[in-house]
Image: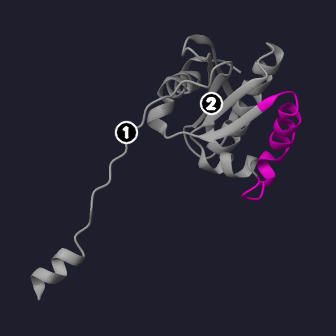
Amino acid sequence: MLVKFMKEYTPSIVTKVVIWRKPELGSYKCNTNGVSKGNPRPTSSGFCVRDSSGNFIYAESSRLLDGNDLIAEAKELVVGLEFCILTHYTQVEMETDSLTMKNVLKGIWEVPWEISLEVKKFKELRKSGVIRVEHVFREGNQMVDYFANMGAYFCKY
């Protein structure tokens, strides 16, 4: 009886390979990340843009006012999209490692009050092109995670 029980309830291990993928031909990918060193504590954010060949085009890191990671994530999605629109990249895949931000921007979850202005601005900017928002695991967002963390230590207000 014990052997049968163990066979039925033995947990399985599931692994998933996570890599950064190139955007579709003719598109750009903008990876974003927000970092908070506490709540509320110093926050920073960063984004990087790559083309459909995977070539690195631009990256930016910013130190923000004290806040939390959700605010930093929301602000950086707006800043990254603003850069793309200003440089005439109108087919953009936005990737964030914040599942909350993805669900808020897709209308699945309600908008938290503290990021309502950023969400409104993002939705307005989104009208300027074909903009998709996708979730990426942290491992697929390593480059921009590095930039965002550097902003917490080296960038000034």
The residue tagged 2 is: 32
- 151 part of magenta stretch: no
Amino acid type assigned to the residue bearing label 1 in the image: Val
Q: Quadrant of residue 157?
A: top right
Q: Residue at x 60, y 48 (%)?
A: 99
**Mark 2 burial class by Cα count in 10 Å: few <14, some 14-19, many 20+:** many
- How far is the residue under mark 1 from the one under mark 2? 20 Å
Q: Residue 82: which quarter of the image?
A: top right
Q: Which mark is residue 142?
A: none
Vertical position of residue 103 compared to residue 6: above or below: above
Three-letter code for the amino acid on which mark 2 is drawn: Thr
**88 on left or right of 66:** right
Q: Earlier in the sequence, mark 1 or mark 2?
A: 1
x and y, in percent, of residue 90 in the image = 79, 22
Q: Position of residue 74 (x, y in %)?
A: 72, 39
Q: Is residue 55 above or below residue 36?
A: above
Label 1 sits on residue: 17
Q: Secondary structure at mark 1?
A: loop
Residue range (magenta): 107-130
